[in-house]
């Protein structure tokens, strides 16, 4: 597979995944850009992986979770808070606004926990693969997901 | 329940995803820029590593330079007069475990303000240092911590090591370079081999090759072999550091003897030699400025020194700074008084020729 072929088919799903991780289209673009630049520069190594797709998802997730090491966050911080002028495209019913509270609560979770939630409930990956992406044990995946769900449940009760 | 709400929330926000067209173009653009910058970096890096950093024998190439004598050696006004420090890292792991690299050779090249002669200061790889973000660890692991996983990054490994060395010594690191085994091999071959003078025979753990005592010309592969040796050496990593200093001394001579600096064709060949095996930092001090400083050196024969360290404490293998000499040495380095320190501690000078 060439880089071009990979980008043709995988860029859109990666970008969707990044939107779910960051909750912000601009940050998602920055995150995907930084990851894909490195993918392109090191394409031979990526192509050697058993599954380039999984390899790149792991790169992107690491980049997101480990914000101190990555350079993309610095750019994001310069821009300040997530852009309020780009609201989520939803219907205008009040119930939708209520339901979107869960989206804003997500942003308060630790990055690793949020990544685990996205991988399970958006990407529908089995726990074993989530562990592979996050580079931790399966037990750790389960405990961070249950901790994240507990946090969200507590928000529900308060709200 | 909440799981379903989550799934729904994710799906509901899918339309937020921007289109991929502009992003793809931006990726290509940034990648192209970075690729170009990387190539420039590599070219500049060889110059740094081979000539500039090591205080190459530029005086020999400038026959018109006034001979010593206080009346004649006035400093030109445009040359910065402060001391310079250049950090050279030799890293291992090339082609073996690509994700695990240690900087086993850490060499600080100090060029004093009076431009008398370069000092090669080896920092032991087992020295205990505090690494930002971690506890006290061995100096050689700073590179690995910085380089990261899964894709090790020479520049990032260098950056963290540079910070650690700057914290440790208190001196400013003006420039530096990272050399892998492959880069070392290609540089050596580009100058047709380097003469290294060993006080004692060295036997290779890796290839069973024997390097006899005395001076010998080594090609690239043999140089790498020699500089990897630690196990059979009586003083282990310290002897390896000394061999690295001997190699650098020979490299300086090789480059100056061959008129590499004055011959554009040879220089260009040398510039492209190490390829990907080298990354370089010339942010602090641009290469051109550093080269401009070199003709001011009175002598190109370096003084080989090692940071004085004590015995390991507890059962750990971390080496502490020598309780008596360590601080004094670092003070001398910081205050640019190494010549005086060497006079007081002649037994601390490594034989490099």
Image: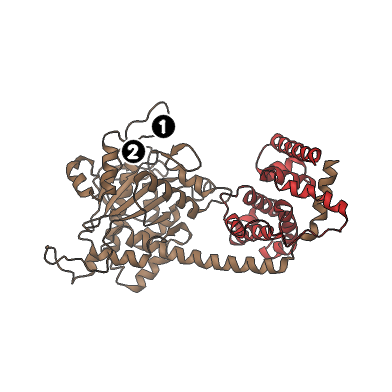
Taking B73 as reference, is B131 above or below it? Answer: above
> Which residue is depicted at the point 72% across and 35% down?
A143
User: Chain coloured red: which letter?
Assistant: A
> Which residue is depicted at the point 28% across and 48% down?
B333
Taking B258 as reference, is A50 above or below it? Answer: above
> What element does badge 1 sit on?
loop
Q: How many residues crowd mark 2 within 10 Å: few (<14), some (14–19), many (20+)?
A: some
Label 2 – label 1 distance at C-alpha: 18 Å
Lower sequence index among marks 2 and 1: 2
Is B203 placed left or right of A18 in the picture?
left
Instruction: Tell me if I can see residue B283 in this picture.
Output: yes
Taking A41 as reference, is A59 above or below it? Answer: above
> What element does badge 2 sit on?
loop
Is B269 placed left or right of A52 in the picture?
left
Chain B shade: brown
Q: Quadrant of residue A13?
A: bottom right
In the rendered image, the residue lying farthest to the bottom is: B264
Q: Which mark is residue A43?
A: none
Question: Disc 2: which chain?
Answer: B
* Closer to the camera in the image, A3 or A123: A123
Question: Disc 1: which chain?
Answer: B
Q: Position of residue B122 (x, y in %)?
A: 33, 46
Instruction: Tell me if I can see residue A123 in this picture.
Output: no
- Residue topped by disc 2: B233
- Residue topped by disc 1: B317
């Amino acid at each position: 597979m060439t880089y071009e072929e990979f980008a043709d088919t995988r860029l859109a799903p990666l970008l969707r995944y990044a939107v779910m991780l960051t909750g912000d289209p601009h940050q998602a673009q920055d995150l995907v850009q930084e990851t894909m630049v490195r993918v392109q520069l090191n394409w031979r190594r990526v192509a050697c992986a058993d599954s380039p797709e999984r390899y790149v998802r792991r790169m992107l997730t690491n980049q997101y979770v480990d914000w101190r090491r990555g350079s993309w966050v610095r750019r994001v911080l310069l821009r300040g808070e997530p852009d309020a002028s780009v609201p989520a495209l939803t219907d205008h019913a009040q119930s939708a606004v209520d339901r979107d509270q869960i989206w804003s609560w997500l942003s308060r979770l630790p990055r690793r926990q949020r990544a685990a939630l996205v991988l399970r409930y958006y990407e529908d990956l089995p726990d074993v693969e989530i562990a592979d992406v996050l580079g931790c044990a399966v037990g750790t995946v389960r405990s961070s997901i249950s901790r994240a769900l507990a946090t969200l449940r507590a928000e529900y009760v308060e709200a | 329940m909440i799981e379903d709400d989550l799934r729904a929330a994710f799906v509901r926000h899918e339309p937020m995803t921007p289109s991929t067209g502009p992003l793809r173009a931006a990726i290509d653009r940034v990648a192209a820029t970075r690729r170009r910058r990387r190539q420039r970096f590599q070219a500049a890096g060889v110059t740094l590593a081979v000539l500039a950093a090591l205080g190459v024998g530029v005086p020999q190439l400038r026959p018109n330079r006034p001979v010593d004598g206080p009346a004649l050696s006035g400093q030109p006004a445009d040359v910065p007069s402060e001391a310079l420090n250049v950090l050279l890292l030799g890293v291992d792991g090339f082609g073996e475990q690509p994700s695990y690299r240690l900087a086993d050779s850490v060499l600080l090249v100090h060029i004093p303000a009076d431009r008398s002669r370069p000092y090669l200061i080896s920092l032991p790889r087992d020295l205990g240092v505090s690494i930002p973000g971690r506890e006290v660890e061995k100096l050689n692991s700073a590179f690995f911590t910085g380089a990261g996983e899964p894709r090790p990054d020479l520049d990032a490994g260098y950056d963290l090591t540079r910070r650690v060395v700057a914290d440790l010594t208190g001196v400013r690191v003006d420039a530096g370079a990272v050399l892998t085994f492959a880069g070392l091999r290609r540089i050596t071959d580009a100058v047709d081999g380097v003469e290294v003078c060993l006080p004692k025979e060295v036997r290779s753990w890796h290839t069973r090759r024997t390097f006899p005592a005395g001076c010998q010309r080594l090609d690239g592969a043999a140089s790498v072999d020699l500089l990897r040796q630690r196990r059979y050496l009586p003083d282990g990593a310290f002897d390896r550091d000394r061999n690295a200093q001997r190699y650098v001394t020979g490299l300086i001579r090789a480059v100056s003897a061959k008129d590499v600096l004055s011959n554009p064709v040879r220089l260009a060949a040398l510039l492209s030699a190490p390829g990907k095996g080298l990354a370089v930092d010339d942010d602090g001090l641009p290469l051109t400025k550093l080269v401009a400083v070199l003709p001011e050196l009175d002598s190109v024969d370096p003084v080989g020194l090692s940071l004085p360290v004590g015995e390991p404490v507890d059962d750990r293998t971390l080496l502490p700074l020598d309780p008596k000499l360590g601080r004094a040495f670092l003070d001398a380095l910081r205050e640019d008084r190494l010549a005086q320190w060497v006079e007081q501690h002649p037994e601390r000078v490594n034989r490099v020729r």
